[in-house]
Image (cartoon, helix red, strand yellow):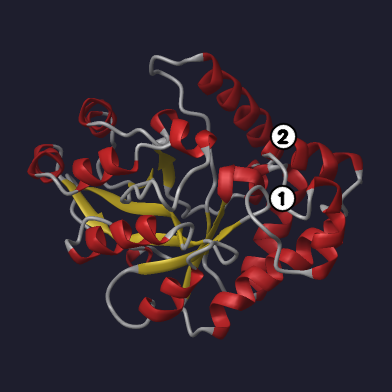
Amino acid sequence: MGSREKYLIVNADDFGYFHCVSRGILELASLGVVTATGIMANGTDFRTARETTTGGSLDYGVHLNLTYGVPLTAEMARAVAGWGGRFPSKSRMALAILSGRIGLSDVEREWRAQIQCCLDEGVPLRFLNSHEHIHMLPPLYRLAKRLAREFSIDHVRHTQPEWGFPLGVAAMVRNAVMQSCNILNPRFRGERTPRLVGLNRSGKLDIEYLDRLFSGFSSGKIYELMCHPGHLDSAEIRDPRLLAYHRWEQEFELLSSSSFLELCQKYHVHLVGYGNLPKG
């Protein structure tokens, strides 16, 4: 790796969330601009993951989930029965875990099932991360690291607050929560873990943000850009909360544009996958 160069894993979250999202991710992977994606094993479109994750250069991981959709395990289904058998919001789930209402043993069974579901389909797994960063909750981060070791998965996303950008109230709250988690989690972080970027424009990346971000990259370092590209099918995605948060088409257009590749060239940013990283 050259001394001037910077390295970027473009990691699309939510593969298997919805078919229109999965389709957009695969199109960007075919262009070589998305280099990794996290599979939501309990997503409504997991069938696409089953059909498309053999061969090719795209790196796959598990997008561990406790905050959207229906659990895979009977134990977790019983634990969330009070929410209609579906995962609650991230704040409610975090409180349920911290209060002991939902036990870590139930979380471990559910996450094992999500990982095993991908392995059973022959998907080679290189990393773990989670939907809405729920794995950064200190007891869950330790669990995710332990499961990664057990399943020989080399990398676990370490979400850090992203200061230095204009922030809305929601972003400030999220950064404060991540800061608190990072105070408790640092000794579990791998020395080779790429620095995560994209948090402050999560779901709404734009070229101005990336320009400012890339300009601050350090030579020789490896970064992970969290992104949420895809296509929007209004017949498939109707949840108003998701529609308010995500700009799937905007991120798809951004990453497939010549402007994105020109920006990478301008700042000597090379797109890589997890296979290019040392283990740990």
Task: Point out residue 32 in the picture as x, y percentages from the top left corner.
Answer: 19, 61
Residue nearest the observer in this picture, 213 or 116: 116
Who's the residue at 19% across and 52% down the image?
270
Would you place residue 63 above or below residue 195 in this image? below
Q: Judging from the image, what secondary structure is the residue with disc 1 in?
A: loop
**Which circle, 1 or 2, is nearer the viewer?**
1
Who's the residue at 38% across and 18% down the image?
165
Task: Tell me, yes or no, if residue 35 can be seen here.
Answer: no
Q: Judging from the image, what secondary structure is the residue with disc 2 in?
A: helix
Q: Amino acid at mark 1?
A: Phe
Q: Amino acid at mark 2?
A: Ser
Q: Which mark is residue 91?
A: 2
Would you place residue 236 above or below residue 238 in this image? below
Task: Tell me, yes or no, if residue 75 can be seen here.
Answer: yes
Q: CA distance from mark 1 to mark 2?
A: 11 Å
Residue topped by disc 1: 87
Q: Quadrant of the N terminus?
A: bottom left
Task: Point out residue 51 in the picture as x, y percentages from the top left corner.
Answer: 40, 80
- Cβ–Cβ under 8 Å for marks 1 and 2: no
Task: Point out residue 53 in the picture as x, y percentages from the top left corner.
Answer: 39, 77
Local packing at callout 1 (Cα closer than 10 Å; few below 14, some 14-19, many 20+) is many
In the image, taking residue 131 as reference, residue 89 lies left or right, namely: right
Would you place residue 32 above or below residue 49 in this image? above
In the image, taking residue 122 as reference, residue 67 lies left or right, namely: right
Task: Point out residue 126 in the picture as x, y percentages from the top left corner.
Answer: 47, 69
Who's the residue at 50% across and 69% down the image?
46
In the image, taking residue 193 as reference, residue 120 lies left or right, namely: right
Query: Which quarter of the figure has residue 176?
Result: top right
Residue nearest the observer in this picture, 160 or 98: 98
